[in-house]
Amino acid sequence: MLASYPITVWTAVALVLVHSWVQNGAAAMPNLATTTGTRAVKRATDQSSAITPALTPGKSQSIYGATCAYVDTTKRFYSFGGWITETGNKNYNVFSGTYSLDLSRTFSTSSPPLTDHGVLDGDMNGGLMQAVSLVLPNSHILIAGGRIFNSTEGTASIVNDQMYEFDPANGAVSKLSPRITDMKTTFPLRHSLMTSSAVRGYNSAYIASGNSQSDRNIDVDVLYNVTAAGIAVVSLSSSTKPAPREFTSLGRFNATHLVLSGGSGKAGYTNDVWMLDEAKRAWTRHPYTMLNKIDQHRMFGWQDKYVIRIGGYTVDDKYSFIEYWDASTNAATKGTVVNPGSGPLSMSEGCAVLLNDTVVYMGGRQSFDNQGHSQGVAAPPVSLLKIESAPAGGLQFRWLDSFTPPAEPSTSGSSSGGDKPKDESGTVESSGLGTGAIAGIAVGCVVAVAVVGLLLYTRRKRQQPLPQEQGGVVESKPDVPVASVVSDRPMSLAVSSSGIQTAPGTPIASQQHLADDVLFLPPVAQPASRPTSPKPVSRQPTNLYLP
């Protein structure tokens, strides 16, 4: 008895410590990015090399790590590849298929109208993860980059060196040729992710940063331009740029700038925000610093003054599931969900598109402790998050349990649909997203400097009239015209300013302009013409999935 007593005591102590760690995961977890210098330890090892080719009728399944695009002509939200499991599980198979969510009809989040469109590429013998998409003027979806998990490589990933074109009209997929021959040696693995899903309105997409396929500790610090003609390297005009990183968020900020935020890698997690001036091809650090050092998050613009971040993974002790930055105060605030029990408490790696005032979030994965620390169980197949004006000022957020398509989808921000909140307590009117001031955010620092300089100038030259052309703000803006915008389009970080009339292409008139990774830059070296002989890909028969 005496010999066994210490063992019993220490066993009890150990159980108490384990229980405490589980209950207080965020506080008990060390800053792994600082202690190890790598994010690899943050990733769960619950991914199988087994392949699932299609959704299973009657099951609630969720996908994360997919490549997505919204097509306004069909009002469908398409998802390609990723990892798949049943809702609430965390043991994933590789998903080689394609499916879409019908946003032209009313539905409940408990029974979303999902349609299966067959395997993306039968020759791949696996699934495509975290690629970049581009919606072409004819509503076809172009897919490039990303990484492949297949039965040959097991759970290891390889760079995707194919480009695919998906036709929503018939579900046909073509491989575009020639293949990018140097991608396996120079193209980054775990490169930038889209701030939100692709839409029509732009002729090019962008991929930034990542690491080498051969060695995760080797950075690949390159910016790529993606068009239907192929992938080309963009030559920057300045050496000032964000440090190379994995899984950063990259998307359009306005008609003249791109925004890059967060990321992770061998140097640890980051919370910095950078702007890329397209005309100058130069990066500058933005005054906005996110509340969390985070990666794999989504971002949107709102009401001409806010930038909203949703989800992501972090190593910080205090986690903000949602945060928003107010351009008028240059302050970031943790977002409040008024009915938190009606939806996920954390969510990352899903697909997101902003329609009027509602974020449609498809798939994704929760963190194991709901504090953004490592991967946990699957998020619901579809989540709906409404953006509202808070009574005391600022923003608040509300989970919805049903979706009603707006009569006139637009970037105005005021929903004409009848979305039903999960918690009816309190009603707050939401206002729209304008078309001018987000561009002013990018030059906010320039404004302040210009105003101070102007005051000093007028004080010294009080007796002299001011020159009519004086005004640093206007003169500092790149001279880039804005394309026309129609009302039947969803909203995003770029909604305040649509496409840019610069090479490699011109903006598509009468199209939507949504912030995501579908972006423009000034002239860059590209293949001379688009491939002319697409190779058809064998497809599985289309079948309808309505749980």
Image (cartoon, rainbow, N blue to C red):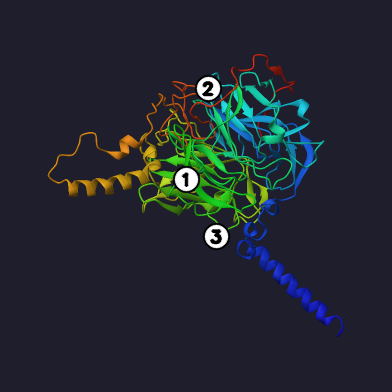
Is 396 displayed left or right of 32 in the figure?
Answer: left
Indicate the quadrant containing the C terminus: top left, top right, bottom left or bottom right. Answer: top right
Of residues 320 and 160, the one nearer the viewer is 160
- What residue did someone put label 3 on? 318
- Label 2: few (<14), some (14–19) or many (≥20) C-alpha neighbours in 10 Å: some
Mark 2 lies on a secondary structure that is loop
- Label 3: few (<14), some (14–19) or many (≥20) C-alpha neighbours in 10 Å: few
**In this view, the mark in front (2 or 3):** 3
Of residues 144 and 220, the one nearer the viewer is 220
Tell me, yes or no, if residue 56 can be seen here: no
Label number found at residue 308: 1
Which residue sits at x=44%, y=52%?
332
Q: Along the polypeptide, which appears first: circle 2 or circle 3?
A: 2
Q: Residue furthest left?
A: 463
**Separation of residues labelled 3 and 1 (CA atoms):** 18 Å
Which amino acid type is shown beneath numbered disc 2? Thr
Which amino acid type is shown beneath numbered disc 1? Ile
Q: Along the polypeptide, which appears first: circle 3 or circle 1?
A: 1
Tell me, yes or no, if residue 158 can be seen here: yes
**Separation of residues labelled 1 and 2 (CA atoms):** 27 Å
Q: Residue furthest bottom?
A: 2
Which amino acid type is shown beneath numbered disc 3? Lys
- What residue did someone put label 2 on? 73
Residue 524's spot in the image, x, y percent?
A: 53, 27
Mark 3 lies on a secondary structure that is loop
**Separation of residues labelled 2 and 3 (CA atoms):** 42 Å
Residue 249's spot in the image, x, y percent?
A: 55, 42
Q: Is residue 392 above or below residue 52?
A: below
Mark 1 lies on a secondary structure that is strand
Residue 243's spot in the image, x, y percent?
A: 56, 47
